[in-house]
Image (spheres, rainbow, N blue to C red):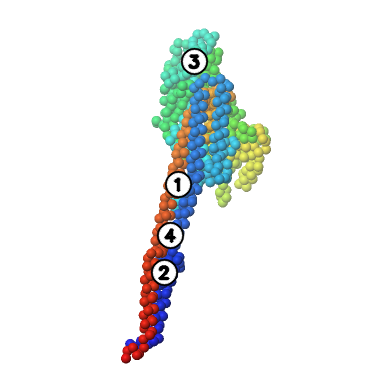
Amino acid sequence: MRITSSSYYNNIYAENNKLNKQLFDVNKQISSGMKIQYAHEDPGVFIDTLRLDDEITTLGQVKSSAQSAYKISTQTDTTVGELVKTLESMKVKMVNAANAAHSDSSMQAIAKELRGLQNHLLTLANTSIGGQYLFSGTATSVKPIGADGTYQGNDQDLEAFLGSGIKQKYNISGSQLFLGDESKINRTISANMPQMSLNDLYPDIMEDPGVSRDASQETYISSSSTIRDLMGDNDADSTNDAARQSYFYVQGTKSDGESFKSKITLNMDDTMDDLMQEIADLYGDNQVNVSLNAHGQIEITDKKTGSSKLDFHMVGAVDFSGGAAANITDIDALHAGSTDFETAAVTTPGLYVKEFTKSGLDTPASVLNTIEGVNYDRTNFEQEGAKLLSNISQIDKTTNSYATPTSKLVDVAGVSSLNTQQLIIEGVDITGTAFTAQIDLATAGSTFSLDGGTTNFSIFNTDSTLRSAVDADEMTYQQLLDVVNMAMSGNLPATNTAADYDAAITTANTQSSTTLDYAGKMVFEDKLNTVTGASLSIYDAASDDYSTTTGNILTFNANSAITIRDPKTDFFTQIEAIIRSVEEGKTRSDGSDTSDPRNLGIQNSIQMMDDLSDHVSRLQTEVGSYSQVLQASSDRTAMLIISTKTLQSDIIDTDVAEATLRMQQLSLNYQAMLSSISKVSQLSLVNYL
């Protein structure tokens, strides 16, 4: 093979360029500190570097998110802790109010201190950081608690991004804190009329009608007391006790939401234990505990935790004349009875009615019974300015959540189906006109009529493609609210058509509104008057009928047992009730006090305060765990960032010592090549002769 000068110089040029490039690359690596600067230099290194860059960016976002959330979480933890301390301070003052003898001025001083702590609770509830309210859910710009104590935020969670598909809640919403549920609490309700032994109060009353009440003999009914002690007797020697009977008419709701009615029959020599066992049996086999408190009031505790549906109402009757006036099927037949034992037993021996609950509620015009304790749900809503307020929450039987306008009536009703059931709406509308409306629920289409009119207006469903009368079990609260609002504003459909039905609703909404509040209670508001002259009552058409054991289909406003404990929390409403018991100086509930018959009393309020403290303490523990998770996530992310940067450095960064050694080697090679070229270039043909 012949090597020409051209080939020789081409080889020299190629080797020179190769070594120059290698020297340039090594020098660039040393000066830049990176193995490559462009993808074409090494695609594998470039791809790995981009991937690690993305991971570092993501980890930085995670760290920033965790640190930001940690600030909110720790501030929330601190604020909730202050709530717990304030509640504990309030409890100390409540115990003091209950255990010590206080003058009225002393009690009012305690009440004022409690009011101050209540204001502090309100301030804590509206705590903000960086312009964001802590307890408004995701509506961080909305003040959580209004001046009236109602919650104005939402129930959504704030979440921190902690990685791909990983989120961490870091807030406690006001809905959870101030309106949350405690699934481990057993609902407890109580009659509010103290019961004393009538035979101790009125000894030998028949032998000497002029005998005065002996206050020194006052004793509260106990579990061993007889029905004669509870109901009294007009026989001083009790000879007719075995023959005479007392009747107790009970209405209520079981823990599963099923309603019931029943008549209990007992002899005069039976005991209160017998009565309480009969009541317990009505709620189902071993479903409730029934007991008497120290003031002879019946208390019922649901054995099922987390249920808020338990309810109770009872009235007793005995006919001292020996007749059957107390044994009735229509509760209104008791309206002629006396609630004064001394009057019934002495002055006019005959029917005596025993009240167990009183609430100071007015009754609609159609209810003739003047004995308050007889009426259960046939009561008028409470007026408050332009509003009429109900006192019974509508609660879903399955979820134990408050009903909303979209909830179906049947999901709350105390019966399995609403077919053939009737509701009565009675009152005075905003123009001052008395009315009675009847809602007939039917699977063939539900209707309503006014004042016994011949026109039955269809309650149309909301399906825009098929406007027909709604089936009973498909009817929602919004449809009921629309009917109530039309009746209360005096706006009825011109004809029984969907178009006129919608037009009547629209007109009614300009004059009044009927809604469900946050606690599932119905609220009517008169938009034309600052103080409404309207009245409203909604009840089951068969409410007074005790010929059946089926309870009321729905209850909106009732003279029912007061609530002592409940899984549902209504923080500021409960705080208000607690303080009011101190302001009014009531150590126990007493329905005979007409100023505020449903007041819990200080003793029951202490139990309520305990439940509120436990609820808030549990949430403090919860938010504390969020802070720990966020702190751990931030620390872990910082370590991962260091680790990832180290790995990235191994891939992309230049090993200066290695690169320097390689540059020295390349320099020697280059010098050797130049030396060889120099020597070879000096050779001629003479050197080979």
Which comes before the other along the chain, label 2 or label 3? 2
**Is residue 422 visible in this depiction of the protein?**
no
Disc number placed over residue 218 in the picture, else none: 3
Q: Does 644 appear above or below 100?
A: below
- Which residue type does callout 3 highlight? Glu
Which residue carries the number 4 mark? 52
- Which residue type does callout 4 highlight? Leu
Which residue carries the number 2 mark? 26
Q: Residue at x 37, y 69 (%)?
A: 662
Marks 2 and 3, how far apart at CA: 107 Å
Q: Which corner quadrant of the image does residue 154 belong to?
A: top right
Which comes before the other along the chain, label 4 or label 3? 4
Q: Residue at x 59, y 41 (%)?
A: 482
Which comes before the other along the chain, label 4 or label 1? 4
- Which residue type does callout 2 highlight? Val
Marks 2 and 1, how far apart at CA: 45 Å
Which residue carries the number 1 mark? 630
Which quarter of the image is occupied by the C terminus? bottom left
